[in-house]
Amino acid sequence: MAKELFSEAKLGGLTLQNHVVMAPMTRNRATTDHDVTPIMTTYYAQRATAGLIITEGIAPSPNGNGYARVPGLYTPSQVTGWKAVTDAVHRQGGHIFAQLMHSGRIGHPVNMHEGGEVIAPSAVAAAGQIYTDTEGMLDHPTPRALTTEEVKATIQEFVTAAKNAINAGFDGVELHGANGYLIEQFISPDVNKRTDEYGGSVENRSRFLLETAAAVGEAIGLDQVGVRLSPYGAFNDITAFDGVDETYQYIAEQLNEIGVVYVHLVDHQSMGAPAVPGKITKSIRKAFTGSLILSGGYDADRAESDLESDKGDLIAFGRPFIANPDLVKRLRTGAELNQPDYDTFYTPGEKGYTDYPVLETEKV
């Protein structure tokens, strides 16, 4: 096997240990008040041999924190907690971006900080239910539609959270424009029924993402801003829509004009969503000249192949990192992978989080 996957990689001004990215994965190990816990520091430090870690989704504001025990980046105590995480990762030679994830209509007041409100581009409730620690499964509430002025204020919440991320020692931020959260809620015409400058045409529905990316880039530097997209995702009651291909082509072109450091393109086929057509990946690759991170059911051989054929610049691995803190070593040596305990993906505590075994250190 060629060594490209395990050779140094460039990402903006950073030199990464390898081309392996730890994908963002919600693990719900924060406190009920959305503060970082010590076991989160351990968890990320254990996985710092990845070239780049992208954290779990972190809420940029109380309105964006719709899940139980999901951390935020909007209070001083949260910044302090994340500083312990970034310091631990950097001591191991790793790099780490904070994924800023505003849940939008995917949330419930029971889960939120006091004062948090379920908001969205339009008053369109998501189908299904959401988990709460105190009341179990509850129906998704109908969100309150943001006014135009509130949309602009929400963009500034992302800017403030990005500044907090840099103050906490992160190497950059990823804007979560995938998986049915707020940014994708604006992009989707099935959810976005607005008639102002943020709704209707492809350009208007893309405006929230593009203005957020530009404003965050101006605040912290564009070489510290990435964007995650899932054009054919099927999470949180958002699916591919008529015109999806032209929409994401436009977004890729505009993100290239803005100059963000990477696009993180997710193909959720391995989790039951439709595959992202190869022509779309190619067109985004052509339109966006920054780094392209590919994600979706990868193993080492397929990762190596897609790097060698220049389909992408970095390869993200998700669930294998849950059960394998030393995933990079296991991929490099061909060692057997631990299997994850699905029952502990989202539960509190160390079990199924920081207690997975690592390979024995080679004897000298």
Image: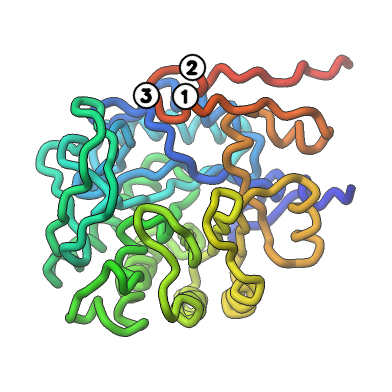
Secondary structure found at label 1: helix
Q: Answer whether labels 1 and 2 touch (C-beta < 8 Å).
A: yes
Residue drawn 83% across and 33% down? 333
Disc 2 or disc 3, which is closer to the eye? Answer: 2
Real-space CA distance between mark 1 and mark 2, rounded to the nearest whole angstrom: 7 Å
User: Which residue bears the numbered disc 1?
Assistant: 344
User: Which residue bears the numbered disc 2?
Assistant: 351
Provide residue 187's location: percent of width, then percent of height: 35, 70
The three-letter code of the residue at mark 1 reads Thr
User: Which residue bears the numbered disc 3?
Assistant: 37
Quarter the C terminus occupies: top right
Real-space CA distance between mark 1 and mark 3, rounded to the nearest whole angstrom: 17 Å
Secondary structure found at label 3: loop
Q: Answer whether labels 1 and 3 touch (C-beta < 8 Å).
A: no
Against 360, residue 76 (above or below) is below
Residue drawn 55% across and 48% down? 271
Residue drawn 27% across and 67% down? 191
Disc 1 or disc 2, which is closer to the eye? Answer: 1
Provide residue 127's location: percent of width, then percent of height: 28, 53
